[in-house]
Image (cartoon, rainbow, N blue to C red):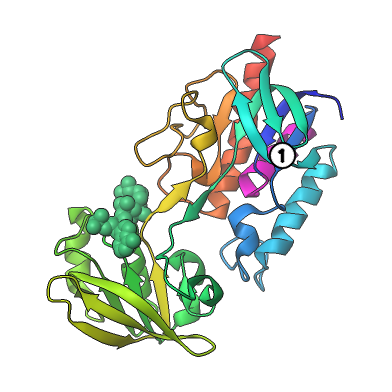
Amino acid sequence: MASLYDLIIIGGGPGGYTAALYGARSGMSVLVLEKLSAGGQMGLTTQIDNYPGFPEGIDGFSLGQQMQQSAERFGAKTLLAEVTEVSLQTPIKEITTSEGTFQARAVILATGATPRMLGLEGEQALTGRGVNYCAACDGMFYKGKSVAVVGGGNSAVADALLLSRVAEKVTLIHRRDSLRASKIYEQPLKQADNLSIRWNTTVSQLLHGDRLTGLALQDVQTGETSDLTCDGVFVSIGRSPASSLFQGQVTIDQAGYIQADESTRTNLPGVFAVGDVRTKPLRQIVTAVADGAVAVHYAEEFLAQSH
Ligand code: NAP
């Protein structure tokens, strides 16, 4: 593998591999650096029904593999390696990995974000078996059922409202006595008559057999405990963007997202951010994929100007 590329992409999720496909097709030499396997967060999703073109849906792992193959068909290369250090402020950017150091004229940051977990016993094992982190992705599995949503921010309220149109009953569980979510949600929350809010309440335990059967709750003011029977819980307490490697070089907002607008350009020339790690209103596969194509458009423009 040559060590100087036109384009290095850090992260092999949908945004990263779409950028690789577009970059390779436009004649750039492209290297994707991926830590584990293609697909990123998507690779952990068993059934994806909101990515067009798959009438029966598709599992995220297969979709990730297919995105990788699509990019490699046009000459993009993948290296399974962990990035340990980056130097992005010079015209030739340097990426140090567990498998060696690589140079690039342009870099796309596509490292994604992981949903924050409650940190309860059994949470990981029950993920996909009653415990969920994405209402837009998994809400349809709860048609006519009873679900809970944890959190009090915009995501939790948007998730609760979405689920109220699908599930029979929705309980929003928030640890304080007021929501962090914006006022525009007040009216729709009042109008959703199958939605109730448990204030000042935390989840202390996941109740389960093979699947989740309910939640043990605790009132944070009185200490009183109670059980809530439900078929599913949606944990919506924020995400952790994987941006720490880039701290001090690209501009990162308070929540840890890399600052970039719809052009995907960061504050640094030749450095772009795509997908869930970027500041954006909707974090979905389709929006990550769109970012990948847009980033290459501006990377091409940048490379043409810097030659
Ligand atoms: P967020 O605004 O950080 O809210 C996280 C919520 O989870 C807070 O209510 C927080 O409680 C609660 N929480 C955090 N850790 C918890 C824990 N361990 N146990 C129980 N509750 C916990 O995150 P977000 O809702 O994902 O939103 C992220 C960003 O995207 C925000 O800037 C948001 O405005 C934006 N967004 C916007 C829209 C929209 O405009 N339509 C939709 C979605 C997201 P506290 O309130 O007590 O801290």
Asked where in the image residue 204 lies, by quadrant, the reply is bottom left
Identify the residue at horizontal 81%, vertical 50% (top origin): 69
Asked where in the image residue 300 lies, by quadrant, the reply is top right
| Residue 133 image position (x, y, % from top left) | 46, 65
**To which residue does mark 1 refer?**
33
Viewer-nearest residue: 220 or 131? 220
**Secondary structure that dominates the magenta span:** helix
Asked where in the image residue 92 lies, by quadrant, the reply is top right
Looking at the rendering, the stretch of residues picked out in magenta corresponds to 12-25
20 part of magenta stretch: yes
Total tally of numbered discs in the picture: 1
Identify the residue at horizontal 42%, vertical 65% (top origin): 119
| Residue 261 image position (x, y, % from top left) | 45, 32
In the image, ligand 1 is in what quadrant? bottom left
| Residue 84 image position (x, y, % from top left) | 64, 34
Identify the residue at horizontal 14%, vertical 64% (top origin): 177
**Dot 1 crowding, Cα within 10 Å, few <14, some 14–19, many 20+:** many
| Residue 63 image position (x, y, % from top left) | 70, 59
Q: Element type at marker 1?
A: strand
**Left or right: where 97 falls relative to 122:** right
Identify the residue at horizontal 63%, vertical 53% (top origin): 40
**Left or right: where 85 falls relative to 34:** left
